[in-house]
Image (cartoon, rainbow, N blue to C red):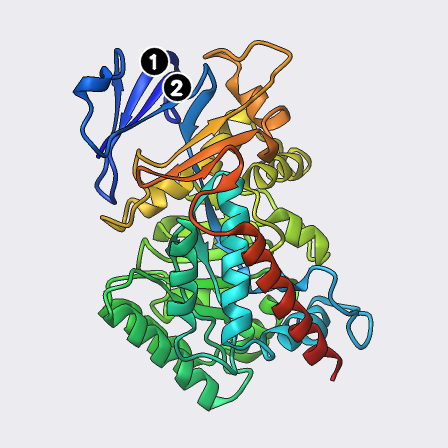
């Protein structure tokens, strides 16, 4: 099967060169993209070939999310916490740890379906998710994977291991990682943060990552408390502890946030070649501070569960880094696209050139090879996403999912959201 895109303004995501052309897209995780002079005539098409007329719209590579918490999907409009949080640790205690402790299979599935649907409609075809459901662990990753796949979204998943819920919950989280990765699924070894992860859990997580040739996915120095706790208990800072325990030895490791890393830690992280994910909107929402990221080339962008829109995350990153040290438009775009460089470490994961977004971008000014970055930051929005192609298959067409019944997915999410809210009020 070949999908032909007729009459495109193709924007190469690497060179930013715009070419008026037709495209041939082949399916699968090893599928490809070719520029062709014209689509075949009707009598030259194979039975399962398709021609999609882009009518001069822009076509470029689709988007990826470097750090998400899809379990937060049902929290929009939820009941207020029992008291107003006065610190980051109280935000966790009164909001997020109360939420994740109440999640069950149906809530997790509904969260994943709704988030995946919203990502697809916003041009996001791949998500690196960090899941937490400490009292409903077994099978949670497979539940998310299947929900994502129903909506056409590629994934790299992990479960949030932590000692905060006791040794039994930590054991179940390690077992869930082992079971999921042993099934052949690609994934990471998830950890919450240094201040809820003891040495034994960290050691075993590193060993599990080695066993499956993967990396850790952990929150690092999101708030100052993470550093204060680490220095008091271990006599070192968080990045130093991770280095000394083997947590930085894989280039597949992801460190989320890194807001409060000092100069020595920044060097440790940069020299290790691990990846850092910026989530500035979440940092602002939680009032933990902001940081620049000009100390490492391996920085990508996430949402931290705030939303599903990576164009919005890129704009927020630009505005943040414009105040913390200055940043060029080209560097924001490079960080936006770095998720593809990260995912290239996982052969066959399905983040190749046959993942595309067709943009109905009604710009009032010319978009050229030389001024794309300005349009990227100040023009392009999720509302311009018209059609989305994932692994060579159309998953959104004319702004509607081709794979799932959107009304059914959202009704299910609302039903499970009410169940979650009722559990929070008990």
Which structural element holds mark 2?
strand
Task: Count the numbered circles shown.
Answer: 2
Question: Looking at the image, which residue is at 45% across and 16% down?
Answer: 55
- Which sits in the foreground, 392 or 133? 392
On the image, which quarter does residue 393 sit in? Answer: top left
Question: Looking at the image, which residue is at 23% across and 37% down?
Answer: 31
Question: Looking at the image, which residue is at 41% across and 83% down?
Answer: 172
Does residue 280 show up?
yes
Quarter of the image for the N terminus: give it.
Answer: top left
Q: Indicate which disc residue 21 carries.
A: 1
Does residue 295 show up?
no
Return the x and y of residue 226 as percentages of the image width and height. Answer: 59, 68
Q: Indicate which disc residue 112 carries.
A: none
Density class for disc 1 (Cα within 10 Å; few <14, some 14-19, many ≥20) is: some
Quarter of the image for the C terminus: give it.
Answer: bottom right
- Which sits in the foreground, 41 or 226? 41
Return the x and y of residue 103 as percentages of the image width and height. Answer: 57, 76
Residue 403 vertical placement versus 141 (above, below): above
On the image, which quarter does residue 43 sit in? Answer: top left
Which structural element holds mark 1?
strand
Density class for disc 2 (Cα within 10 Å; few <14, some 14-19, many ≥20) is: many
Residue 368 vertical placement versus 332 (above, below): above
Q: CA distance from mark 2 to mark 1?
A: 7 Å
Indicate which disc, 2 or 1, sits on the residue closer to the N terminus: 2
Residue found farthest to the right: 83
Q: Horizontally, is 33 left or right of 403 in the view?
A: left
Return the x and y of residue 230 as percentages of the image width and height. Answer: 55, 73
Return the x and y of residue 402 as percentages of the image width and height. Answer: 44, 43
The residue labelled by disc 2 is 10
Q: Are marks 2 and 1 in contact (CB under 8 Å)?
A: yes
Residue 111 vertical placement versus 320 (above, below): below
């Amino acid at each position: 099967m070949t999908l032909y895109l007729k009459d495109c303004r193709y924007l190469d995501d690497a060179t930013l060169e715009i070419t008026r052309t037709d495209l041939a897209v082949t399916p699968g995780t090893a599928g490809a993209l070719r520029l062709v002079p014209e689509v075949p005539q009707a009598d030259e098409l194979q039975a399962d070939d398709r021609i999609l007329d882009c009518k001069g719209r822009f076509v470029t590579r689709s988007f990826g999310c470097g750090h998400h918490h899809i379990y937060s999907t049902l929290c929009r409009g939820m009941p207020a916490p029992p008291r107003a949080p006065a610190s980051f640790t109280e935000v966790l205690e009164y909001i997020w740890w109360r939420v994740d402790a109440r999640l069950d299979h149906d809530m997790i599935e509904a969260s994943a379906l709704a988030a995946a649907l919203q990502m697809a409609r916003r041009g996001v075809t791949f998500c690196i998710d960090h899941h937490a459901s400490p009292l409903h662990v077994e099978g949670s990753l497979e539940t998310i994977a299947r929900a994502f796949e129903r909506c056409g979204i590629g994934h790299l998943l992990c479960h949030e291991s932590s000692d905060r819920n006791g040794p039994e919950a930590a054991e179940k989280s390690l077992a869930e990682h082992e079971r999921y990765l042993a099934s052949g699924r690609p994934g990471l070894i998830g950890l919450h943060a240094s201040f809820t992860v003891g040495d034994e859990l960290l050691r075993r997580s590193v060993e599990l990552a080695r066993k499956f040739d993967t990396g850790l996915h952990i929150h690092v120095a999101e708030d100052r408390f993470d550093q204060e706790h680490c220095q008091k208990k271990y006599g070192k800072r968080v990045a130093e502890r991770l280095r000394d325990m083997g947590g930085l030895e894989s280039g597949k490791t992801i460190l989320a946030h890194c807001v409060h890393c000092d100069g020595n830690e920044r060097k440790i992280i940069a020299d290790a070649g691990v990846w850092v994910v910026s989530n500035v909107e979440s940092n602002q929402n939680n009032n933990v501070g902001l940081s620049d990221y000009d100390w490492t080339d391996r920085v990508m962008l996430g949402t931290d569960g705030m939303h599903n829109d990576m164009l919005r995350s890129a704009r927020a990153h630009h505005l943040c880094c414009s105040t913390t040290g200055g940043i060029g438009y080209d560097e924001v775009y490079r960080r936006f696209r770095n998720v593809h460089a990260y995912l290239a470490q996982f052969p066959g994961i399905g983040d190749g050139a046959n993942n595309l977004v067709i943009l109905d971008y009604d710009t009032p000014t010319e978009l050229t090879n030389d001024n794309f970055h300005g349009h990227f930051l100040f023009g392009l929005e999720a509302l311009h996403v018209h059609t989305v192609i994932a692994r060579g298959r159309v998953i959104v067409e004319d702004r509607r999912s081709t794979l799932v019944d959107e009304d059914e997915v959202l009704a299910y999410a609302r039903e499970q959201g009410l169940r979650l809210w009722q559990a929070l009020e008990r």
